Every structure is written in C-alpha cells, then in structure tokens.
Amino acid sequence: FPEMLEQWAGHNHIALLAARPYKPRDKPSVENGVIIAYRRIYAQLRTLSVELSVASLRIVKCFILRRLKNLTSGSEKNKKFLFGLW
C-alpha cells in the first residue's frame, strides 16, 4: 500500500487488507473461459441467416447461453463455477 494510505489507516485505527494478490494466478484461466464462451455464443449467431433486432438478439443469446449451461462435458463443479450457477 502507498505510504499515505498506511498513514491514513493508522490515523483512523483501521487495518488494510489486500482484496487480491498482487499477481492473480487465475486471471488467464478466467480470460480463456470468457473467450470460449464468447466464441461459442457468437459462432452460433453468425450462422443465422436473418437480421435480428437488438431485443431479439438478446433473447437468442440468452437461449444459447442456457444451452451452454446444460452441457454435459466437464465436472459439475467447474460448470457451475464457469457460468455462475449456485
């Protein structure tokens, strides 16, 4: 933490705790998961031969995301972590 922040914390009698490590090690795996999900969603949208409104596009993306959530590959724990199902 910067020295000024530490002085402020000492003055106010509070402790400073880092929310994340300086170099998070899970960042590359999370970014790869986002890329995979993005590709799976938009690859299916590219195959559509009709033009959609913004509202229709959101509905289709939600439908595709629900299908991706129900995939059987991978462990159930990883799937829940990847898609935020709990």
Image (cartoon, rainbow, N blue to C red):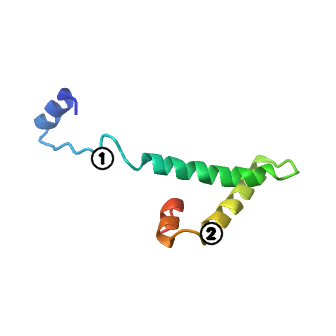
State the SS at label 1.
loop
Q: Residue at x 88, y 51 (%)?
A: 49
* Residue contact between numbered discs 1 and 2, judged by CB atoms under 8 Å: no
Position in image of residue 24 (x %, y %): 36, 45
Q: Where is residue 58 in the image (x, y as percent from the top left)?
A: 71, 53
Q: Of tags 1 and 2, which is closer to the observer? A: 2
- Quadrant of the image occupied by residue 61: bottom right
User: Where is 83 relative to 10, above or below?
Assistant: below
- Disc 2 secondary structure class: loop
Identify the residue shown where x is 11% and y is 34%.
11
First in sequence, mark 1 or 2: give its number: 1
46 relative to 11, above or below? below
Amino acid carrying label 2: it is Leu
Task: Quote the CA–CA distance across marks 1 and 2.
Answer: 33 Å
Q: Between 64 and 40, which is closer to the camera in this rendering?
A: 40
The N terminus lies in which quarter of the figure?
top left
Give the residue at mark 1: 19
Residue at the image point whose x is 73% and y is 57% from the top: 59
| Left or right, residue 29 beside residue 23 | right
Report x, y in % for residue 75.
Answer: 50, 71
Residue that protrudes farthest toward the top in the picture: 4
Q: Which numbered dot is residue 71?
A: 2
Q: Position of residue 62 (x, y in %)?
A: 68, 59
Query: What kind of residue is marked 1?
Result: Ala
Which residue occupies the foreground of this view, 48 or 28? 28
Location of residue 74 (image quadrant): bottom right
Mark 1 surroundings within 10 Å by alpha-carbon count, few (fewer than 14), some (14 through 19), many (20 or more): few
Is 76 left, or right, of 55 in this rendering?
Answer: left
